[in-house]
Image (cartoon, rainbow, N blue to C red):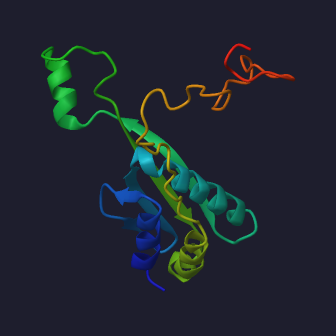
Amino acid sequence: MSRALFVEGLATVGYELASPPNETANQLRLSGRVNQSRTPSWLTTIELLAIAARKQDWSIDISKHYFVPDPLAEVVESGAEPINGTHVLVEWRIIVQAPNIAGHYGALAELIAKVQQPRSELMEVPLHAPPNRNALKNGKGAQGTMSAKVGPGYRGDGR
């Protein structure tokens, strides 16, 4: 299997390459970003790869790299922008090492394929009901658990 298949697998969990991969016979080095909305998939992938690496003949190092890009660094150094922490960017670095690294891309791609993609979650549904939809009528209707009037003979009309 090829390196491209491994990189495509990383893209399915939200990893976007920031620069071309750097590959030698024994090492693959990647730099990329992960959109904040894809963080759950990405963290699951990191966990899966870290656990798998313990039992394999390859090793993996995944870390965050903080940096200020060159054009911004020059602007800050010139004094045109204040040093306040807003110019710092973050990228994820992945370093995979093994003798003959190319022979392990298939296994790495299979591991990433096991990561389940998060499903969207419905947070709100419009009810299309008037604001007084819970008003008591003849002792019937929705009531709060702490303020509900209950007991024998209670009809809701005060009698």
57 to 117, vertically: above or below: below
From the viewer's side, name the closer residue of 131 and 45: 131
**Residue 76 horizontal/vertical position (percent):** 20, 21
Q: Which quadrant of the figure contains the C terminus?
A: top right
- Residue at the spot x=43%, y=77% of the render? 3
Left or right: where does residue 113 sit relative to residue 143?
A: left
**Image coords of residue 57 (percent x, y):** 69, 72
- Judging depth in this view, the residue of 135 and 24 nearest the camera is 135
Residue 81 screen position, x and y as percent: 17, 17
Q: Nearer the viewer, residue 13 or 105?
A: 13
Q: Quadrant of residue 149?
A: top right
Residue 154 shown left or right of residue 108 in the figure? right
Q: Position of residue 61 (x, y in %)?
A: 57, 54
Location of residue 108 (image quadrant): bottom right
Q: Is residue 100 visible?
A: no
Q: Is residue 18 above or below residue 159?
A: below
Residue at 78%, 21% (x, y): give it: 154
